[in-house]
Image (cartoon, rainbow, N blue to C red):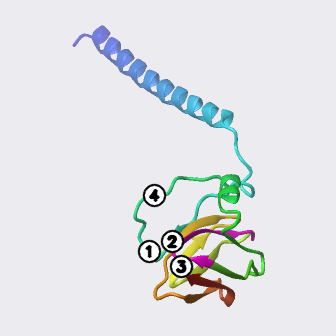
């Protein structure tokens, strides 16, 4: 190759590298700009869903915001405060029941109901289905290291 041809090839390679870097950088800028324009909800108001740790999920549940879950499960919600005090702490439901476990503490919690463990993030919640047999059956609820913080009576 002549010296001029080598210079032209080097310049083309450098231009290709610089164009690729600019393209990637521009893509990141667009992505960051889109994220900045997306409204961010208060995590204390809209926590992420928690998942069960001991039971495989059959199918993913539709994602609900905290506000939507409060409305949908207003009569089927068990709330746990910073000291693991459950409200309400003595409830009766028809079997099976789907209810909301609501962690209002600033720390993650493990809630155990009917032998299943649910991991709830700080200010998180989980929508769980409880199916107990034989009926009637009284289920004791554990919050973290505290046992019997609530009772759930399952009936026909």
Residue under label 2: 52
Dot 3 corresponds to which residue?
117
Q: Are marks 2 and 1 in contact (CB under 8 Å)?
A: yes
- Magenta stretch: helix, strand or loop mostly: strand
Q: Residues within 10 Å of mark 4 (few under 14, many from 20)?
A: few
Q: Residue furthest left?
A: 1
Among numbered discs 4 and 2, the one appearing first in the sequence? 2
Contact? badges 3 and 1 (CB < 8 Å): no
Badge 4 marks a residue whose secondary structure is loop
User: CA–CA distance between discs 4 and 1?
Assistant: 13 Å
**Which dot marks residue 94?**
none
State the image coordinates of residue 131 (x, y, percent, origin top left): 49, 77
- The x and y percentages for residue 73 are 66, 62
Residue name at image x 70 percent, y 70 percent: 103
Q: Residue furthest front?
A: 156
Question: Image point 64% across, 65% down: which residue?
Answer: 125
- In magenta, the rendered stretch is 93-105
Disc 1 secondary structure class: loop
Query: Is 136 inside the magenta-drawn segment?
Result: no
Q: Within 10 Å of the Cα at label 2, are there few (<14), some (14-19), or many (20+) other Cα atoms?
A: some
- Location of the N terminus by quadrant is top left
Q: Which mark is residue 55?
A: 1
Asked where in the image residue 40 lies, by quadrant, the reply is top right
Mark 3 and mark 1: span between their CA atoms? 8 Å
Give whichever of discs 4 and 1 has the lower sequence position: 1
């Amino acid at each position: 190759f002549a010296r001029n041809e080598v210079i032209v090839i080097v310049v083309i390679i450098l231009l290709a590298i610089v164009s690729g870097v600019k393209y990637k950088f521009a893509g990141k800028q667009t992505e960051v700009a889109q994220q900045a324009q997306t409204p961010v909800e208060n995590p204390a108001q809209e926590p992420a869903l928690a998942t069960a740790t001991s039971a495989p999920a059959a199918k993913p549940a539709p994602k609900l915001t905290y506000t939507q879950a409060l409305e949908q499960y207003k009569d089927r919600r068990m709330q746990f405060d910073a000291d693991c005090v459950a409200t309400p702490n003595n409830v009766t439901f028809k079997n099976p029941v789907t209810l909301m476990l609501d962690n209002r503490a600033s720390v993650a919690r493990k809630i155990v109901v009917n032998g299943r463990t649910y991991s709830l993030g700080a200010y998180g919640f989980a929508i769980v289905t409880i199916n107990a047999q034989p009926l009637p059956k009284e289920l004791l609820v554990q919050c973290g290291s505290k046992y019997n913080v609530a009772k759930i009576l399952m009936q026909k």
